[in-house]
Image (cartoon, rainbow, N blue to C red):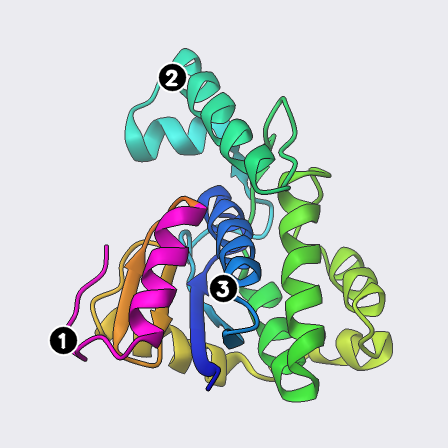
Amino acid sequence: MPSHIRIDFVSDISCPWCAVGLGALEAALKRVGPDITAELHFQPFELNPHMPPEGQDAYEHLHEKYGSTREQQAQNREAIRARGAAVGFEFRKEGRSRIYNTFDAHRLLHWAALEDAAKQVKLKKALLKACHTDGENPSDPEVLVRLAAESGLDPQRARAILASDEYAAETRERERLYTDAGIHSVPAIIIDNQHLISGGQPVEVFERALRQIAGAAPASTALA
């Protein structure tokens, strides 16, 4: 009998490795289908919850956070670009000019999940593309409304949500749920609420983990 699993993909829009991880996970799901099917849910995580509305220069932010030089950042961008290309995701060669707050994007993703799971997936991918491929500002309400509409969601409803604090409390609650559970880096992929795969792993790692879990691996199994 085919196995059906639930996947909670904890991630942030501004995380390039989350784009890589999602591409690899989806490629792995294609490999294991139709024997294994999945119900995918995106969960919020903010790498920079205190980022101001105007954002911050990308080089300055990464230098302050990790101490990396321009040369090191350029090398990291190239490595990530190669990993993205391998799973069908395109990163801008020059990288992002600024890092922005992503809380409103997470609020819209929360709403999208209530509307239609497939539309949440479309919106998540659109947000990642806007941020990492097109160099857009994922905190700009006009950008968010446009992406919601392109994902099949009601743009007027999206605009109303962004103009209010709707789903703010729910989004904060979901964020706390995962940080309280010990998740402090993303992507974090949780399968059936008991198996954790951390990081933007290669396709083969995801495929092996999915097959192992679907084959009734013990609940205590830790996958990394």
Alpha carbon distance from label 2 to label 3: 37 Å
Q: Residue furthest top?
A: 71
Side of 188 relative to 180 (left or right): right
Rendered residue at 47%/83% (across/down)? 4
Sequence order check, earlier mark of 2 and 3? 3
The tag earlier along the polypeptide, 3 or 1, is: 3
Q: Residue at x 80, y 82 (%)?
A: 157
Residue at point 35% right, 70% down? 190
Residue 135 in sight from this viewpoint: yes
Q: Nearer the viewer, mark 2 or mark 1?
A: 1
The circle on residue 162 is: none
> Residue 20, percent across and down?
50, 45
Viewer-nearest of discs 3 and 1: 3
- Name the image quarter holding residue 97: top right
Q: Mark 1: which secondary structure?
A: loop
- Indicate the position of residue 49 as horizontal and vertical percent values: 42, 58
Residue shown at 68%/38% (left/top)?
A: 133
Disc 2 to disc 1, how far (Cα)?
A: 38 Å
Crowd rating for badge 3 (residues with CA inside 10 Å; few <14, some 14–19, many 20+): some
In this rendering, which labeled residue sits more in front, label 2 or label 3?
Answer: 3
Q: Position of residue 184 (x, y in %)?
A: 27, 58
Q: Which residues are magenta?
A: 203-224
Residue farthest along the front direction in this orientation: 1
